[in-house]
Amino acid sequence: MKCSLTTIVTAVLLIQHANGNRIPPFISNWWQQPLNAAMPVKTPKLQHQDLPTAEDALFGGIATFAHLPYEMCWQPDSKFDIAFVGAPFDTSTSYRPGARFGPSAIREGSRRTILSGGYNVPLDVNPFTDWAKIVDCGDLKLTPFDNERAIKGIQLGYQSLLYQSPFNEKAKFPRLITLGGDHTITLPILRSIHSVYGPVSVIHFDSHLDTWSPYYTEHDHNLNHGTYFYYASKEGLIKKGESIHAGIRSPIADINDYKNDDEVGFTRIDARDIDDIGTDGIIKKIRKTVGNNYVYLSLDIDVLDPAFSPGTGTPETGGWTTRELRRILRGLDGLKIVGADLVEVSPPYDTNGQITALAAADAIFEILGIMVKTPVV
Ligand SMILES: [Mn+2]
């Protein structure tokens, strides 16, 4: 059969944005560039300013978090204040795998956010256009065949970013927001964080304790997404008694699990506590626990009820809503957040409405806002 294929697709968005003067130079240089520089030469009727820019491409382009510029962050001359990095690792998962696809899912879930439209009303900040240079470094390269190698790879990759120069004098070290990945990734991250800040308070949003002691031996072979805090505590990476879980509700063997959790060094807020003390009571308890310490914030998306985050490895009913979680996160405004991760997004179990990916992206939007508002020096 003879076919004639003559399909011509031309789509040019003639939208001009006139708010460039609010954008710091390191961003405006990037996002006001025409997407196709060759276009004006061949189409004389179009003016440069009529051409579509990256800002117009809400649903186009290669996904970075919130359309942030992609940066080759491991290059020696790379400078940034806050960077996103993906850790696509899920081979220490105990139940449903798939979180290796979390980083790309979260970036897809963040497409709705654009840099100039990123004003956070309750926090009164647009994190993207404030003082900080924020970039997306892409993902760490992690093998699924050798967990020990992958865990070392996370620490190596993360730590080398941590020691890059900040772009702005307001920061002493760059700060990273890691997109997981199963929760095991938090251990090599905390090892890196410790090399800069010493022991830190951890604010851990999760339905699970993740402090369980290894069942069989003390070797790293039993390092998994339910035991990493046991190791972190044992290695002296966290401030014992000044770290806290929020949203706990998973099944436990018996009350000894909580006793073990006490020994590992955590205070607990159960998910159901919200019925008695509300979001404000939860915020107060978190702030009282961590005080003025350096804080590492680790957020397992299963802290949300599965109605709001079905796409996760180990869902537990009876969790918080997205609105409640976002309010609690904003309540941490002013704390010295030295780094954060959002883990356990498993897109194979998400809906085709991307509920989980959206919740993850928006939770990060709140965290990013408070990180920008409070530089850590
Ligand atoms: Mn969990």
Image (cartoon, rainbow, N blue to C red):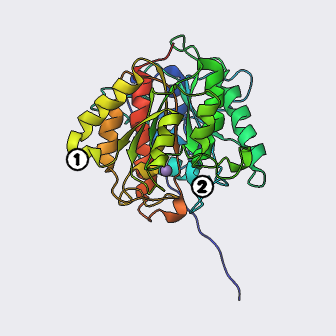
Of labels 1 and 2, earlier in sequence is 2
Name the one closer to the observer, 332 or 111: 332
Picture coordinates of residue 303 (x, y %)? 41, 49
Q: In this orientation, does residue 333 appear?
A: no
**Residue 226 horizontal side relative to residue 191, left or right:** left
Name the one closer to the observer, 355 or 64: 355
Mark whose residue sits in front, 1 or 2: 1
Residue in view at x 57 percent, y 22 percent: 199
Picture coordinates of residue 343 (x, y %)? 53, 46
| Residue type of the residue flagged with mark 2 | Phe
Secondary structure category for the residue under label 2: helix
44 relative to 368, above or below: below
Secondary structure category for the residue under label 1: helix
Query: Residue 198: which numbered mark, if any?
Result: none
280 relative to 293, above or below: below
| Residue type of the residue flagged with mark 1 | Asp
Q: CA distance from mark 1 to mark 2?
A: 34 Å
Q: Quadrant of residue 155?
A: top right
Disc 2 target residue:
101
Residue in view at x 47 percent, y 59 percent: 311
Is label 1's Cβ within 8 Å of ligand 1? Answer: no
Picture coordinates of residue 337 (x, y %)? 47, 25
Q: Rate crowding at label 1 as few (under 14), some (14 to 19) or many (20 or more) other CA atoms within 10 Å.
A: few
Disc 1 target residue:
275
**Residue 190 horizontal side relative to residue 324, left or right:** right
Looking at this rendering, what residue extends furthest in the top direction? 169
